[in-house]
Image (spheres, rainbow, N blue to C red):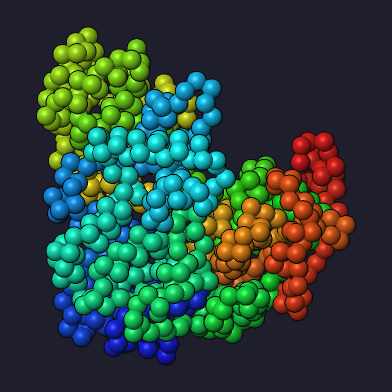
Amino acid sequence: MELNPQQKAAVAYDGAHVLVLAGAGTGKTRTIIGRARHLLEQGVDPGRILMLTFTRRAAREMVQRLTQLTGQEQLPLMAGTFHHFCLYTMRRMPAAFGVANATVIDRDDQVQLMKLVRGGRRRKGEQLPRASELVSLCSYARNTNQRIADYLKRYTEHDEATIEKICRLAKEFERRKRANDYLDYDDILFVFASRLQADSALRQRLKSLFDHILVDEMQDTNPLQWLILDGLRDPARLFCVGDDAQSIYAFRGADFRNVHAFTRRVPNAAVLRLEENYRSTQGILDLSNWLLTASPLKYGKKLRAHRKTVSKPSLLDFDSDFEEARWIVHDLIERHEAGADWRDHMVITRTGYGARALESFLVEQKIPYRFVGGTSLMQAAHVKDLLSLVRACASPRDELAWARYLTLWPRIGDVTAARVIREMRTCSDTRAAVASLAKILKARRDVSDGLSAVLGDWNDPPAAITRAGHYLAPILKTRYSNWNQRRRDLDLLARLAKRHRSLVAFIETYTLDPVSVTESRRLQGEDAVTLTTVHSAKGTEAPVCYLIRVEPGMYPHIRSLGREDDEEEERRILYVAMTRARDELVLTRCLRNGGFRRSPYSVSVAPDREREAYFFKDLDRRLVNSETITAYFDRSDDYGALHPDDDDGW
């Protein structure tokens, strides 16, 4: 594995803690793998190395590459996401963390539980935030390690009375989770970090487990994850790889300061830089570098291309998003007819609704595409239906799973389900619950038989998933019109379950790191254009990238205007989008009458504020090939009868 001088310096660093600022495409994964290999060659016990990433797939790929480099079939080092590491540790020390009987629930379960809480507390006619919004508020407050009341007062416009109501709902929500032994996604980090900070004996015990902690994507860590790293370091050395210019997940609680203030937080820490880019051409990097140097913040990096090819990005102006979309589709077809695969092209949009016109033309022209950032496979309704049966088998206290499973069956409504659930909670284990269910619903043995069938294969995860799918198929077939397509997802679940020793581990793994429905299609080798939001594009790349609607109101997004930190994160979002391109970057926008066009989807914001904040208002035109494209299509073309002037709602 060849390394450049900057990578070698990072890999062999022999001091205490170090932050490696790895610009886009500079080989951060290669560097962190090289660091692990270097430690092993220096005689470090692999069991004393902890590697933390943000996706299960990234962790798996790192371990696979490391085993290939070392020539060993298995390495006993621990590698996974923060959530997996914390849950793995807590499962092996359940008494210390108080999670002996916990069931991990996902976002959909959180919302369903909050609906129950909200419905039980809401008076007739009372105005309260929706359950999904309440869950988001609780989640953000927890991930940023703030009291819910403090967060609401600082970041929302709710009045005192509403804040008090939300706080009561949040308190009841937490109580209901504890009563049902639920752990949601945020609880995993919170419980671990809280116990780590509060219990000195536990902290010393965990500190003694590792000598080196390697952290990928450091810029995406939130305050809870920082507390975990801070609690585990010394004597363990931190080797953190990240890029402050790619910190774009503040809405999830990611803290920009975890990278930007690293040396202030960690005494005697060093900062090393990787600036040689192996992905993009210099022309693409020149535009990206310009964007960062225009910032009031000092990012202190200037990417240079390893490749010799120089290609300037294109900046194309259109009269409407309608013509913008039609031109992109025309260009895609021309490239495909010239021999390029559909998969070589990525279209990046700031928001999902910003690509509506483009999606309509992709469908019209039968261009295969997948939208990344869509529904999680584990959150698809039919998958949730099947997993409710499996989860009910795992715990008689899981009221959300029992309610969903029971109400799948004809003639079993909410009232009957609630009565059954009350009985289930008194049972000592699942087999006792199934026996009790058979007595309660004497005439409906099919309901309890489903549970018995899965329990019969409980120690064989793929067989249990297959059995559950066969048992529920007649019911699900009547519920979903596109059952043949959905049925393939259940087959995929059974294949994924083969990787796990237990059903509980399988459910927890994909609850914490879900596979999207579109990703599951991609795994089957489909050749398709990728349509993605900027946030979902991070970590991906393509030979040709179209970055659409790079216009006022989108970069920065109008919702960020007037808030300095938010506007600056929008700059980083644009930087991430541009650096996804390997060979060609095409930026498109809609400007009318030589001025700035108001977004039809935006709220009311003063046009001059959009113009002043717009990142490209002072663009050095030497960095791009500019072109204004007007009247590109007429009614005689072969791309359909619609036209920008038609009264069709566009």
Q: Position of residue 347 (x, y in %)?
A: 61, 57
Q: Residue at x 15, y 50 (%)?
A: 94
Of 219 and 593, the residue lying toward us: 219
Q: Is residue 317 left or right of residue 465?
A: right
Is residue 105 at all visible to an observer of this figure? yes
- Rendered view: 373 above or below 121: below
| Residue at the spot 54% in from the left edge and 82% down from the top edge | 300
| Most distant residue in the front direction | 160
Observer able to see residue 327: no
The foreground one among 545 and 290 is 290
Residue 60 falls in image quadrant = bottom left
Question: Residue visible at 38% across and 48% down?
Answer: 514
In this rendering, would 155 be left or right of 284?
left
Identify the image quadrant of residue 181: top left
Relative to 471, residue 280 above or below: below
Residue 203: quarter of image: bottom left
Relative to 485, residue 218 above or below: below
Residue 48 horizontal/vertical position (percent): 18, 73
Residue farthest toward the top in the current orientation of the protein: 443
Quadrant of the image for the N terminus?
bottom left
Instruction: Name the one closer to the observer, 386 or 288.
Output: 288
In the image, what residue occupies the spot 29% across and 37% down? Answer: 175
Q: The C terminus appears in which quarter of the rendering? A: top right
Q: Count up the numbered dots.
A: 0
Q: On the rendered structure, is 263 left or right of 450?
A: right
Percent x, y of residue 117? 38, 30
* Residue 491 against residue 367 in the figure, above or below: above
Q: Percent x, y for residue 555?
A: 66, 60
